[in-house]
Image: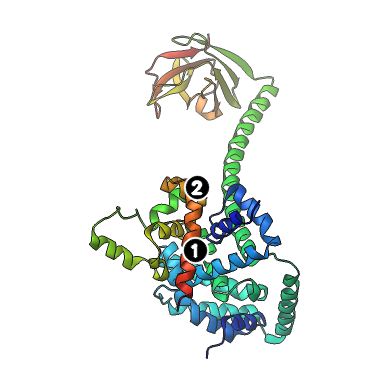
Amino acid sequence: MPTPGGELIRAMAAGNRDAFAQLYDRYAALVLAFVLRIVRERADAVEVLQDVFWEAWRGAAAYDPSRGTPEAWIITRARTRAIDRVRPVRRRGETFVAATAGPPPPPGGDAVMRAEDRQLVAGALAQLSEAQREVIELAYYSGLTQTEIAERLEQPLGTVKTRIRLALARLREVVTSP
Amino acid sequence: MSHEPFETLAAVYAVGALDGDDLAQFEAHLPTCAVCQATLREAQDALARAMLSTPPQAPPAGAREALVRRVGRARGADRRSWLRWAAATAVVAAAAAGFTGTWVAVRYEARLGQMARETAAVKERLARNEASLREQAALYRGAVELLRDPATRVVDLRARGPAPAAGGRMIWNDVGGGHLFVAGLPPTPAGKTYALWTIVAGRPRPAGLFGVDAAGRGILRIAPASAGAAARVFVVTVEPEGGVPAPTGPIVLASK
């Protein structure tokens, strides 16, 4: 049975380089896939990946399992670094949104396109409704705030907030169901 | 206030999209609320698991090697590892004392990153402003230096043409060159610029091009060599941008 991620991080905090290599081998390819959804250039994404793991090494001592899983610890950091990379100047809406998932498919658009689109949707997110997935992607991948999302979707702020909450609830169901 | 709204805020916070008053309100509430801490933890965990459920993308082997090397260098000998372990234990113990969550920390890091970017932009703007102010100060200092010299003359330039309110003053020194200050000139048409000429021995010599700001003011520094010594007469005309060897356009200002 593999060593739990939390133990690896504890060992890293104590200076164990093998633990670091194990953590890298376990998560690097998954983290890279995630970073690539935010940072489209592969070379940039690899740099972000390295930053994330370097910070994981440096920050291992501050990891507190009571505050979250190792996966959440890594992904939260990876997201922050990735968003930083694609948003060098705070003009998030302009510089970045164009590079994300692209325009939403037309409602009831043709079946072929929708099927392709679905293939591009990452794992568990594919289980969300279009509307729920959209808010999660705009927030989590594009780094838009709730206000920016509301403006972009031309929806009331309250609707956006509720949609995010429902999307997360659904996502929890999806990832915890066996 | 009921707790229900906070549950929505926690979800929006988890995806990093909270802003404005909501953000301030939630961050004030979070350290005091075990329910929200748990909600946030669960949301972050679900998000992480969802994000890690995508097909993996193998990073280049070089990335791993570089990291492992870097980690090796950073550690040096393992003799200090017990110190690190002790520090880790201490940090965990300290962290248990109060909730200053990783999420809050990461959130602040993100904000710090953003502030760093904004600061860089402001710095750049300031540097540009500073450069232009320095230039201006140098210009004025040059004019003041000239004025200290008893050999410097001040020559008035009067309007000759479509802008009767326009005027100018030339601070001129045969050795040190000159400064032209103008006011009340209309902006030049597209493709045109103002040109200063010195008349020496009856022949116009180009002494520089200048534009005016929105208020019709302009300054031109004239290097001594370009002007020709013993200039007594100064004329401003409108010329094509880029300048011409001899005046072609209408005269707008001239010394008497």
Q: In the image, what residue occupies the spot 59% across and 39% down?
A: B131
Q: Amino acid at mark 1?
A: Leu
How many numbered marks appear?
Answer: 2
Q: Chain of mark 1?
A: A
Secondary structure of residue under mark 2: helix
Q: Is residue A54 left or right of residue B86?
A: left
Rendered image: mark on residue A168: 1
Task: Specify which label sits upstream in the sequence, 1 or 2.
Answer: 2
Which residue appears at 50% of the width and 10% of the height?
B159
Tell me if label 1 and label 2 are in contact, CB under 8 Å.
no
> To which quarter of the image does residue B154 belong?
top right
Residue A98 in sight here = yes
Q: Residue at x 48, y 48 (%)?
A: A148
Q: Chain of mark 2?
A: A
In this picture, residue B180 sits left or right of residue B137: left
Name the residue that disc number 2 marks.
A157
Please rate how many residues cluster around mark 1, counting C-alpha atoms within 10 Å: few if below 14, some from 14 to 19, many from 20.
many
Q: Is residue B29 left or right of residue B247?
A: right
Q: Nearer the viewer, residue B187 or B226?
A: B187
Tag 1 secondary structure? helix
Tell me the crowding category of disc 2: few under 14, some 14 to 19, or many 20 or more residues within 10 angstroms, Cα based.
Answer: some
- Residue B64 against residue A92 in the figure, above or below: below
Mark 1 and mark 2: Cα distance apart in space: 17 Å
Can you give x and y, in whole percent of width and height, for residue B178 in the image?
58, 24
Q: Amino acid at mark 2?
A: Leu
